[in-house]
Amino acid sequence: MNGGSYIALSGILAEERKLSIVTNNISNVNTVGYKSSGAEFAEFLSPKAVSALNSGMDKPLADKSYPIILNTYTNMSQGALKKTGNRLDFAIKGKGYFVVQTPDGIKYTRNGAFSLNEAGELVNQEGFPVMNTDEKPIFLNERGSNITVSDSGIINLTDPQTNNELYSGQILIVNFKNPEYLSKYGDTLFSATKDSGNPVQEQNPDMLQGYLEESNVNEIKGMVQMINISKTYNNMIQVLKSYSQVNNTAINTIGSAV
């Protein structure tokens, strides 16, 4: 395979990766708390091209460079806040993440669509317990009714006999030095990484009860990206076919000459 074919093939693979990311974003346009993904690409020069560049050539072997993925990233910008009226729906305004306990350890999320399981434990949509500021599960079933949660996440229940408010803990909200480096765990959960830094409890959290944060995916932008990626992909396919035809013609010509 010649250099041109390698370039076309690497371009095809890069566009396939782009398409996979954009398609996944669009499929999660209605997923509560979803954060869109993207990818950063760079041009890789072959050793031969690098050698030519070091020798002083202005345009060293342009057909010996290939697109490669540097890394994927998550767009952590806030999605729109939608009023639901559900007392167990919560949205974080600004910075911060809810904390849930999973079989794989502690994870973080912006998806505040919670509910109570049979034990009266506050859980997320996957059934994972939501943590309080003591990093323990939150139980609400036997202490009263009319759950109210303050902007800072303090939970109060109303005693049905005395009508007094009962303090029932505080929902834990944490933040990270570099949240953009959190690693995705499924669609709306994240794991801490070395680059994200360790979680730190948010001292002034700002929550809304009865609201949810919608996906931050821009569906129209995503559709335009899909169209452009498809065009580039098809062009790369045609380029690869052209190089293959040239190679076949050259082989046949050499063969007939022999």
Image (cartoon, helix red, strand yellow):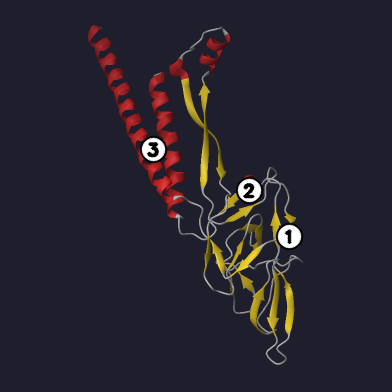
Q: How many marks?
A: 3
- Residues under labels 1 and 2: Cα distance? 21 Å
Q: Residue at x 45, y 40 (%)?
A: 18
Q: Quadrant of residue 178?
A: top right
- Give, as a three-letter code, the residue at label 3: Ile
- Give, as a three-letter code, the residue at label 1: Asn
Q: Position of residue 183 (x, y in %)?
A: 61, 48
The reply to whether dot 1 and dot 3 touch (C-beta < 8 Å) is no
N-term mark: 1 or 2: 2
Asked if 97 appears above or below 248 in the picture, the reply is below
The residue identified by callout 1 is 204
- The secondary element bearing badge 3 is classed as helix
- The secondary element bearing badge 2 is classed as loop
- Residues under labels 3 and 2: Cα distance? 27 Å
Q: Residue at x 70, y 50 (%)?
A: 176
Callout 3 environment at 10 Å: few (<14), some (14 to 19), or many (20+)? Answer: many
Q: Quadrant of the N terminus?
A: top left
The residue identified by callout 2 is 182
- Residues under labels 1 and 3: Cα distance? 42 Å
N-term mark: 3 or 2: 2
